Image (spheres, rainbow, N blue to C red):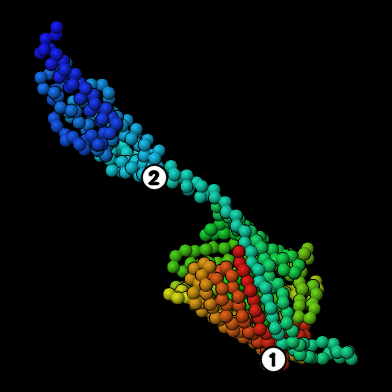
Amino acid sequence: MTPACSLSDRFRGARSRSARVGLLLTLAVFPSAAHAQLPPAPVPAASNSAATATPTPAVVAPTPTPETAPGPAPTTAPAPPPGPVPAPATEAQDSDDAEPHSKHKGEGNKKHKHVLAFDSGAAEPEARNSKDKQPAEPAKKKAKDKANKRDLQLKGRIFALAELSHRHETVVGSSGDIVTRNRDALDLSLQSGRFGVEYQWRFVSAQLELEVAGKPRVKDAFIEAGKRFFVKVGQFKVPSSTLELASPWTLPLARRGLVHDLMTDWMDIASRRPGVAFGYRGKGAFKPKLTLGAFQGTTFKQVAPGIRDVTLIDHASLNAQTFAARGEVTLASVTLGGWYEQRVGSTAVGEFSHFATFGFDAEHSQRFKSGALRVWVDGSGGESLYVKADKPGTDTSPWFAAARALVAYRFGGLALGEPYVEPFGFFAMMDPDTEVVTDFVTEAAVGVAAGFWDRARVSLQGEMTNGQRNFPEAFLDNQNPDHLSLLLQAGVRF
């Protein structure tokens, strides 16, 4: 028989080993729960004896720290000695991250980042160095991607116009005589249908715009290279007055008016031409800008009542170019500009001459809490193409003078697509010949535009023009410039 004392000792040893194995299994499955239930206690020295008079206290898992996280405890009997957390805690951290990533991906990422940012101890320098070095490669990559970025943008706009007008017109009567009569009319038209594409790559940009209302034709087609110093080649607007350079979509007017038509269509000032331009765009408080260019001239082609057609001079002369320059500076919210154009003009088929033209202008734009004020003012002068028929003969071209002003105040529309209402007023006058009296032409317009800023608008405009009795007959092909009109315009931009 086995002695009683021996059985008792063996029973106590077995019970001690069973309790220890059970506790280790509990720690392996529920490490945080076991740690919370059992307070930490000093661990006595391990004993190799299977039988001990007093049971050994349970081993408590080390407290988790930001450096280490608890992991599965070993299933073997020996308990770890007291002291600092051993180095293999890194493996426990990796295994702990696996569970949050699989169940709560966002929280797992946040925990991982938090450890890198706020870890302490020996791993801190390595983590911080890696954090400092990581953005270096993405920064270089972003800069390279930005340099190689290519932007392609489609754009367009549509203007529809309804005009109710009362005019004086000169026609050939039934008896063959020239007679003047009044005409009232309501006209509906597609005023403009323009589509274009813009391309940007590094410091090179290109633009193509087609007008498809009526006979399709190219409006703008050019390539521009450079930022501060730039060169521009193709077909584009001649540098001139700010009112001529502004887009019809930017101006609140339903149309630019009679003085614009007389200057561009009948005296060949400004407008679009094939050419080349060189320029400089400065920075700083004044933002100076200078543009110099040479553009192919045009010659007279044919004339119809109220319409003058021209064509580009082709293979005719080494002196068929218009030379133009414009400079501007910005003072606070006002842009001041001046321009000069040695333009090519023509009054007969196949013939052309050079005429001097110059002008000054100012543009003001200021935003307020509830809206914005916009103002354009310009004045110009130069040599004219047309002379009053009964003016005494002269060997020199007459000089003209013109002035225009446009004022608008916008309520709302401070952000793209925001609703707005913008009343405006416009006045212009032109003296075709400074040596002749009673030959002025004047025009005035008032109206209101409303819609969604820079996206869609509807404009209602009333306008009136008047020409004095000595107004040159060659302008408008003997048509009377007097008229009253009520315009309703709808426009969309995309």
Provide residue 483's location: percent of width, then percent of height. Answer: 70, 87
User: Which is nearer the eye, 315 or 193?
Assistant: 193
Q: In which image quadrant can residue 253 be found?
A: bottom right
Q: In which image quadrant can residue 492 be found?
A: bottom right
Q: Look at discs 2 and 1 and give the one toward the viewer.
A: 2
Secondary element type, mark 2:
helix
Residue 247 seen: no
Location of the N terminus (image quadrant): top left
In primary-sequence order, the first of circles 2 and 1 is 2
Disc 2 versus disc 1: distance between alpha carbons?
79 Å
Q: Residue furthest right?
A: 175
Q: In which image quadrant can residue 95 be found?
A: top left
Provide residue 352's location: percent of width, then percent of height. Answer: 75, 73
Provide residue 227's location: percent of width, then percent of height. Answer: 53, 58
Query: Residue 7 has which mark?
Result: none
Going by the numbered disc 2, the residue's amino acid type is: Gly
Residue 112 seen: yes
Q: Which residue has dot 1 on it?
A: 468
Location of the C terminus (image quadrant): bottom right
| Residue drawn at (57%, 59%) of the image | 230
Going by the numbered disc 1, the residue's amino acid type is: Gln
Q: Which residue has dot 2 on it?
A: 106
